[in-house]
Amino acid sequence: MEKGTIQIYHGIGQGKSAAALGNAIRFAAEGKTAIIIQFLKSEVNTEYFEKLEPEIKIFRFERTKEGFDDLSEEQKQEEIINIKNGLNYAKKVLGTGECDLLILDEFLGVLDEGIVSEQDIIEALEGRSITTNVIITGLNITPGIAGVADSVLNITPEK
């Protein structure tokens, strides 16, 4: 039984989510399963993911089509509940080993927005099945989250 890893893709450059998706496709090609949970993204067309099921499944718990920063305070409060439901689902997937790869896309932004704490994220990661691989994407990383990761990649443009 192979031990899973925790990877963090962060930084101001583009391509963090695409790199994570590439890993999901690689896992699917090996006959493994991946779950992607998106956070803080405006609604995008994800119909193409249906062609990748059942090996790759994508979930988005937020209900609005707009990005989080474009919402009114009332809408943000409603979405915070939905985002926390996404975190609870992630904890369940991590704890049960339901998939071989769990991608928490733009999850670091949830921390930036103050929706969850660094400790919430660390506890979720520490509660994972030992065989589950995890990729987390987002702009900013904290020392505590970096400390539980096996690898941290800073995606920063040179030009």
Image (tube, rainbow, N blue to C red):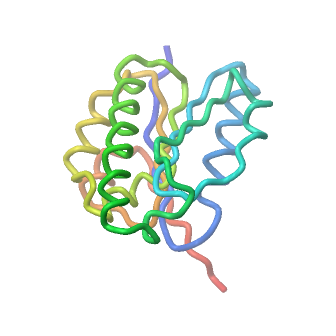
Looking at the rendering, which quadrant does residue 131 occupy? top left
Looking at the rendering, which quadrant does residue 43 occupy? bottom right
* Above or below, comparing residue 108 to residue 60 in the picture: below
Q: Nearer the viewer, residue 75 or 94?
A: 75
Q: How many marks?
A: 0
Q: Position of residue 127 (x, y in %)?
A: 28, 28
At a point 75% along the width and 31% down the height, the residue shown is 50
Q: Quadrant of the C terminus?
A: bottom right
Q: Is residue 50 left or right of residue 102?
A: right
Q: Position of residue 78 (x, y in %)?
A: 34, 51
* Above or below, comparing residue 46 to residue 91 in the picture: below
Q: Position of residue 59 (x, y in %)?
A: 55, 37
At a point 42% along the width and 67% down the height, the residue shown is 71
Q: Position of residue 72 (x, y in %)?
A: 37, 68
At a point 39% along the width and 27% down the height, the residue shown is 94
At a point 45% along the width and 66% down the height, the residue shown is 139
Q: Nearer the viewer, residue 146 or 120?
A: 120
